[in-house]
Amino acid sequence: MRRWALGALGAGVLAWPWVAPRYFVFLASLILVNAVVAIGLNLLSGYTNQLSFGHAGFLAIGAYAAALLTIHAPAIPVVVTLLLGGAITAVVGLAFGVPCLRLGGLYLSMATLAFGFVVAEVILNLDALTRGADGLRVPAGRIAGWALSTDTARYYLAAAVTAVLVAGAVNLTRTRVGRAFLAIRESEVAAQASGVSLAAYRTAAFGVSAFYTGVAGGLFAFVVGYLSPDAFDVFLSVDFVVMIILGGLGSVPGSIMGAAVVTVLHDWLAAFQNFRPLIFGAILIACMLFMPGGMARALRPLGRR
Amino acid sequence: MRLVVSLVSVLLLLAGSAPVRAEQGVTDTEIVLGCSNSFTGPLAFTGEQLTKFGIDLYFKGVNDAGGIHGRKVRTVYYDDGYKPQEAVANTKKLVDQDKVFAILSPQGTAPVAATLEYLEQNRVPLLFPYQGSPVTRGKKYVVNGMVLYDRQAKMMIDYLVLQRKFKKFATIYQDDEYGKAFLVPFEQNLARHGLKLVGAESVKRGATDVSAQIAKLQAAKAEVTFVVLTPGPGAQALKERQKIGWTDTLMVSSGPLTDERFLGLAGEAAEGVEGLSLWPDPLTSDLPGLRAYREALKTFAPKGEPNRYALHGYFAAMMFTEGAKRAGKTLTRESLMTALTSMKGFDTGILPPITIGADREPLTQGFWVRMEKGRFRQLTDWLKSE
């Protein structure tokens, strides 16, 4: 049963550009990008209880790294560029994770919030490299001689990368690291008593989360085609938090659903202009009232049937 | 394996297909226009004024009078909150889903720049964007909408050096691309006159205390100080200058800061500030175009107040209407661009006669103003940046 559902989902994802109008192909790419960020954030917040309000910063690092690599070394295949972008972001994430070990709860959230602002400032001030507030045009990525210059090509890239990263996240809980994350989620004290090094795994969670977000940043750069510090403000970080809370903390399918709902909602509400924040807020409150555990928990009874 | 084959064939197919040229957004009865703009975020006020109180205001008049060659104009707007990625999404939606004919007057350097390549590729006209950075210069399907910042800088320096005989210039500028878009041409144009900046102090984006910078500029004995800041810090700089009693310098505001509403934030510290105004006074000017604008505002949007942002949108809609009229009954994107770029000496009643040349920069002029009792007083006739 589950295999059939997965197969149908896969076929749907592959067929999407052939059945949907061009704009919705672009929108689907954005959903995929946001889904990867949401999964990355969920690995950190859902599993090791570290809520981050600075993931727009990680996204920006991955995006700028991928864009600059593509500009200065166009020969590198796009997949390698994405991996390098993810790796650079992961290093930053690890470096940021270490001092954050001493912080918990609100203090950690404050630190991540500040991190997001710092990244935007750094991008503005490194304008020789990033072109500052004027923004950076991202050339099309190349893979085996092909330039990914259409919405459909970029969609397939995003879909393939997302599929790999989703598989990775689902299977992570079967590894030693993943088990440790789960143990920390259930009880930090109990995990520590069982020999799980809290410090090491909380730092590792930052690294893994940053890697996911960095790869998503690279995809973001190619899908949107233009980067500017205005893109990565604090509201984007809040959107990511909304995605995982709406979808369900600690759930990979929940992250994807949350990302899809928030992305589509933003797109749909753009037409309401000034009333957009009001309607968005009202919908969120309703969701939290009727689905307190997120969509993943609300839909769980359906899956059991 | 089959997946790989189908993926590759998909890519092959896509690489082979060039963008399709279909005329869209024009029917026998309707022309659809739109833009992504700020309705939330830092520039929400400007965005609403540009669109609902500017563009729509003019088109209401046009539609009531029977439209353009019998076609009514309909507008579609989406909010991007000043985020470039949302501007891209909105613009793609406008072109692919709403099938707009052209993009009219979107706002902000980053959101506009993010959509440039997509619009050029799809040959969608981008008309009168509300942004002043030269990123939109030299694009085939763009007609620029502001006096671009480097032209403003040139006009200011030429006027102050040649007509007012000032020699010692300094600037306090925001440390980002907006500030640098003025700083660099200030230096270049002063160099043409054999002069240099005697002081240049930067202010970080978001900073509110500018006392150290103002003190340094006073020590540099600048005769003219250009204020290239956003409204908050700009007002702070003027107040600080008043507080330390630095009177022997002329404060000159630059770019969008030159507006009574923004300078008014500094209260009486803004008295005597001078600058380059790109539009006639929307409240008091007696020009026929402005009287018509205030009349339209009274008729169609009595709650609206006259201001320069709405006037920009109103002007953009007027220019589009004129271009579409000249393009004739068979309106296409190409015929519109041809009609616009061959426009010579069109009298808007708002600005001096408009000529759109091959550079597609119709707005090249401004006049000098001084802040007196909270309003601008015009000191010169129109200055040119040619």
Image: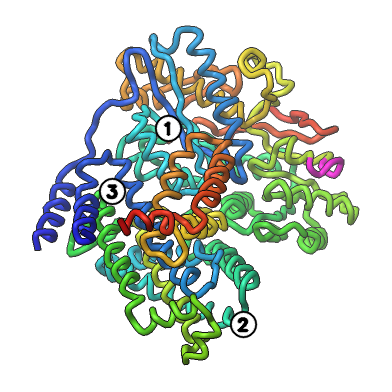
Q: Are marks 1 and 3 in contact (CB under 8 Å)?
A: no
Which residue bears the numbered disc 2?
A102
Q: Compare marks 3 and 2 and give the one earlier in the sequence.
A: 2
Say whether residue B377 is left or right of residue A300. right
The answer to whether A28 is drawn above or below residue B144 in the figure is: below
Residue B189 drawn in magenta: no
Q: Mark 2 belongs to which amino acid?
A: Arg
Name the secondary structure under disc 2: loop
Subunit of label 2: A
CA gap between label 3 and label 2 equals 44 Å
Q: Can the viewer see residue A100?
A: yes
The nearer-to-camera label among 1 and 3 is: 3
What percent of the width, then of the height, locates residue A135? 47, 55
Work out which quarter of the rendered image holds the N terminus of chain B and state it.
Answer: bottom left
Which residue bears the numbered disc 3?
A151
Which residue bears the numbered disc 1?
B103
* Residues shaded magenta: B265-270
CA gap between label 1 and label 3 equals 20 Å
Q: Which quarter of the figure has residue B278? A: top right
Residue B269 drawn in magenta: yes
Camera-side residue: A91 or B104?
A91
